[in-house]
Image (tube, rainbow, N blue to C red):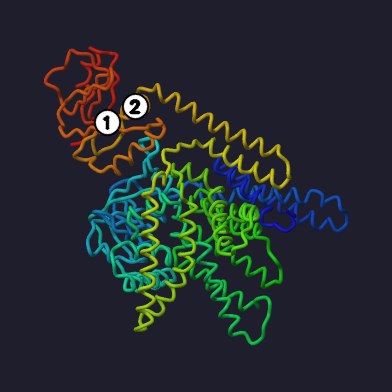
Amino acid sequence: MNWSTIPFFRLLLPGLLGLLLAYCLPWSAAAHWGAYSFWGVLLLLLLGQYLGRYSPFFWRFWGLGLQLLLILGGYVWTYERVLRPREQPIPLVWTEFRARVNSLPQPKSKTVQLQLQLAHYYEADKGWIVCQEPLLLYLPKDSQALALNYGDELVLLGKPRAFEAPKNYGQFDARAYYGQKGISAQMYSKNWHLAAKAAPSFWGILIDWRLFLKARLRRLIPGQDGAYSVAAALILGDKTDLDQELRQAYSATGASHVLAVSGLHVGLLASILGALIKLFRRKSAWRYSFREAILLLLGIWLFALLTGAAPSVCRASSMFSLLILGQCLGRNSSIYNSLSGSAFLLLLYDPANLWNLGFQLSYLAVLGIVYFQPKLYRWYYFSFWPVQYIWGLFTVSLAAQLATLPLTLYYFHQFPSYFWLSGLLVVPLAGILLPLGMAALLCLDIPILGGLLSWLLVFLLRLMNGAILAIETWPMAKISAFELASWELLLAYFAILSLVLSLAWRRITPLLLGACCLLFILGHNSWQQLRAEKQAHLAVYQSNRGLYIDYFHGRTAYSYYDSTVWSSARQRGYLSAGSQRRAKIKSLEEQPIASKQNQWLLLGQKRILLLYRRPEYWPEKKIDYLIADSRLSDSLLLPIMQQQPHIQLIRTSLGR
């Protein structure tokens, strides 16, 4: 590959290095001097470019200076955009707030979730104080809360709470998840009222269009069998109505990528708009004019914003934008340059995009398809074209899976065994459903045609959902319980990079180095499994809801939990899945506990006393673990701790 054909990649690398340095060294003094250094290096580059006319000596250091400039720029921009401490943080006290609704209401089981943009908060001695910070809000679920719209202004009373770090290993990290979105606190409020309805705005109009299209889609698909929710995700990028069963089925079969608006959608839209533009041209031309390129870009980005501007659709839209601009200027752009350019622009807009899982998976999948798929496709040729077409789809799925597999195992801890089969079914169906859904939305009010398109759309959606749900039930459809450490993730991608270098240089040495990395990962995993065979330890999960403990003996987990609050297996897995994966558990034996009286548990040779309330007397028998409710005072526990100093005391909430 010629470096001159990928200028954006040469800009992306040093900028990315500066971004990573900012996260590793988020120092205000470094950012301060980095800003001065940035302008100093820029001045030297401009001076060197001027003096280079008279002496080629200055050009020797111009490239090095540009790289340094990009590193400094990436560092300073990331610090200023993301990492700088807030000048006026959200007060974590009970007070009154004025805020603007920044999202549509998301109904939960008992509440309605909203994202707010705070404007002011009230202090008794200072009055109203400006605070321009985002906040996650929960309101009681009622018709008034569900009727709120983007841009509405609220006055509310409550006490914000900062997001806490996860209390249990492997638990969902809400602080990191919402921190990527710039949200540092959440609040529940019963005392609120609508101060003003939303004023007309660009975002408000886009959301109204989206709601209008969702309403038309609901008229197209009136059933409650999951067809509507999949159609809303596939066509409009709206996953709010997807139930947990369908989400899990698409994830377990490796087909969840079709539910995200991505290159398939943007490519189809660009093709339709390009065909319409060529249809109304007065004369034929091989490239777009400036006006035609502007129309195409407006259409693509309007669609991206209308569907929620997820990382995958922004990646695709920015790539197509660069390709269209290149064609408008009469230049053929490299796919790697377009990919690097789109990543550069998205990270320039928000450096925190780098840690967004959708951003990572989207770019890795496209990189895998672009690099590995042509090489895999050329391995074999079938003379019968339908088989060759299936082979092409298979190699696309295989290439994307190869590039994203380490990241998938790291985040989701599972491997979809039949990803290749779901790809053969879902990708062609999605290619049909997308234009069919758009046509059905347009022709909904046409009596015969609208009904025919609606029936065909529902039939294909149910066919796709049925196939995915059926594949999920097959033996070994999902291989779970993968636990990949951060250093193992890096080693796995180093092995993939070694494969790329081996193919590029046509040498076996990088391939052997990559194979050694994979063998080291496998060896470490085998050693962990052997060590797990001899383990015997207790895990007490921290939760305000009630008791939940695991006793790991070998590769069997004995679970004891309060059956009045932990009746759902999904809720129990939310707490314990991470620890059970780390312990390499093969079998699970569960023992629900209904009584909330002080009681004994015998786990192997260990005696555990569950202490819900003050005992009438302290037992004389040996206690190995004392699990006491966090509401019990230390003075109450002092006698038994003095009597049996070997006791391991664990304080946790045992429920009310």
Q: Amino acid at mark 2?
A: Phe
Residue 652: give its label. 1
CB-based contact (under 8 Å), mark 2 and mark 1: no
User: Which residue is disc 2 drawn over?
Assistant: 552
In this orientation, does residue 470 appear? yes
In this orientation, does residue 364 appear? no
Give whichever of 309, 191 is nearer the camera: 309
Give the SS element for disc 1: strand
Upstream in sequence: badge 2 or badge 1:
2
Q: Amino acid at mark 1?
A: Thr
Measured in 3D between alpha carbons, the distance from the residue under mark 2 to the one under mark 1, in whole angstroms, is: 19 Å
Q: Position of residue 28 (x, y in %)?
A: 55, 43
Dot 2, crowdedness within 10 Å: few (<14), some or many (≥20)?
A: many
Dot 1, crowdedness within 10 Å: few (<14), some or many (≥20)?
A: many
Where is the C terminus found, in terms of image quarters?
top left
**Residue 578 vertical position relative to residue 177 in the rendered view, above or below:** above
Give whichever of 272, 202 is nearer the camera: 272
Please name the residue shown 28% across and 32% down the image.
589
